[in-house]
């Protein structure tokens, strides 16, 4: 069986490599064509190629499950056409045992997917965000027209809201607006700075214009009387250091898609969000989805088995690949739909991440078992319902 398993692994790995290279080339070509309009003096063609090269790990992360599905179907359908699967079956290998061999073949791919998910893709995403900041002036991601917004508590029990217009590489920022509030959410100061940088747990701002709202302003509003003196004080500071929980890593975490962050960065960002009483549901779901991601490859291999085995005598490889693509796209759509519906309906995170994969696994196992024991099921049906017996 070891020889048969190695032969299966070689065929599947070779087929999956070809499929993934084709998909990566196709999607990269489309992205290059779509981005050619942005090429200019600052954003050169070389910068475009550099950004597309940095996007390759992320594309591989997204395409790996569907590439494994199509590649496995191609390899297994080819073996079935050459009657090599028949030889395995005649030698005593059942369909479920063959599926176990396919699962063993998938284990190295799962290890590679974990490395890709935890180290390669997050590093490439960070580099890509920094390159976008350098060449385009924007990292994209979760950015509003007014910039990026962050909220955190202060030492005196109040809160502060930080608005950053532009993120730059190496932890530098531009267009900083700082809103400071008391415990009762009364605005005490509004500060603006041209630029700043993060260092040693502090936000160091340059050329700060601080508008301090004096206590007389609140008293005048409470008494509905005109103020007797000035209600604000404008102070210009060449430099101001602000102790903050924000870091360059958390700034980029605000930009990145949660599933494309490393698990340690994601957990750190969740801790930051919870500490500042902010919504972290999307990030918690992403933790579960990242944990399930390697096992998605097992599910894809399980789906590929019945698709490749069916109609081995009559069906062609093209029909099976087409069915595999439809199944893969349907699984991807259901997975995304479960994510969106789960977020809207406030489902538990593990339900959103695990249930669609579990349902797909059970359906694939049921289809494979039905194909394996179809003759026994047919005999049982004939015995239970005699009128289904074919006339002699």
Image: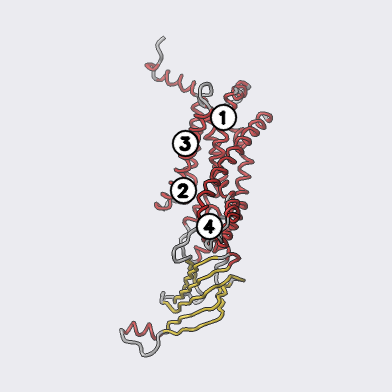
Q: Identify the residue shown where x is 59% and y is 64%.
A: 169
Q: Are marks 3 and 1 in contact (CB under 8 Å)?
A: no
Is label 1 or label 4 in front? 4
Q: Residue furthest top?
A: 392
Q: Which residue is mark 3?
A: 326
Question: How far across and how far down the image is residue 173, in percent?
Answer: 55, 69
Q: Identify the residue shown where x is 50% and y is 50%.
A: 34
Q: Which residue is mark 4?
A: 256
Spatial separation of the CA atoms under disc 3 and disc 2: 22 Å
Q: Residues within 10 Å of mark 4 (few under 14, many from 20)?
A: some
Q: Quadrant of residue 389?
A: top left
Q: Which residue is mark 2?
A: 352
Spatial separation of the CA atoms under disc 2 and disc 4: 20 Å
- Position of 340 relative to 315 (above/below): below
Is label 2 or label 4 in front? 4
Local secondary structure at mark 3: helix
Mark carried by residue 41: none
Spatial separation of the CA atoms under disc 3 and disc 1: 24 Å
Of labels 2 and 4, earlier in sequence is: 4
Of labels 3 and 4, earlier in sequence is: 4
Question: How far across and how far down the image is residue 274, in percent?
Answer: 49, 63
Mark carried by residue 96: 1
In the shown orientation, is residue 115 left or right of residue 320? right
């Amino acid at each position: 069986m070891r020889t048969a398993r190695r032969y299966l692994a070689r065929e599947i790995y070779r087929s999956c490599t070809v499929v993934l290279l084709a998909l990566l080339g196709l999607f990269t070509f489309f992205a290059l064509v779509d981005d050619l309009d942005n090429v200019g003096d600052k954003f050169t063609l070389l910068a475009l190629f550099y950004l597309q090269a940095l996007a390759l790990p992320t594309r591989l992360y997204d395409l790996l499950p569907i590439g494994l599905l199509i590649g496995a179907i191609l390899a297994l359908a080819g073996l079935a056409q050459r009657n090599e699967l028949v030889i395995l079956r005649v030698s005593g290998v059942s369909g479920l045992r063959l599926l176990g061999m396919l699962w063993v073949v998938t284990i190295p791919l799962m290890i590679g997917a974990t490395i890709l998910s935890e180290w390669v893709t997050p590093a490439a995403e960070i580099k890509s965000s920094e390159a976008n900041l350098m060449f385009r002036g924007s990292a994209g991601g979760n950015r509003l027209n007014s910039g990026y917004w962050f909220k955190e508590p202060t030492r005196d029990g109040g809160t502060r809201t930080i608005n950053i217009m532009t993120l730059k590489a190496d932890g530098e920022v531009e267009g900083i607006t700082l809103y400071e509030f008391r415990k009762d959410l009364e605005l005490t100061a509004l500060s603006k700075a041209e630029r700043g940088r993060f260092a040693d747990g502090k936000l160091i701002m340059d050329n700060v214009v601080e508008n301090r709202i004096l206590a007389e302003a609140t008293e005048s509003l409470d008494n509905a009387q005109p103020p007797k003196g000035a209600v604000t004080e404008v102070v210009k500071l060449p430099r101001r250091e602000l102790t903050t929980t924000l870091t360059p890593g958390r700034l980029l975490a605000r930009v990145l898609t949660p599933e494309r962050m490393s698990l340690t960065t994601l957990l750190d960002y969740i801790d930051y969000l919870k500490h500042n009483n902010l919504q972290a549901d999307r990030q918690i779901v992403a933790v579960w989805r990242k944990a399930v991601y390697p096992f998605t490859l097992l599910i894809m291999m399980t789906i590929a088995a019945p698709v490749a085995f069916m109609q081995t005598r009559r069906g062609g490889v093209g029909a099976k690949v087409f069915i595999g693509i439809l199944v893969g796209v349907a699984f991807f759509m259901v997975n995304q739909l479960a994510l969106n519906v789960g977020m809207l309906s406030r489902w538990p995170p593990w339900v959103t991440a695990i249930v669609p994969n579990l349902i797909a696994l059970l359906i694939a196992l049921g289809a494979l078992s039905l194909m394996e024991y179809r003759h026994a099921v047919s005999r049982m049906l004939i015995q239970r319902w005699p009128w289904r017996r074919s006339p002699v």
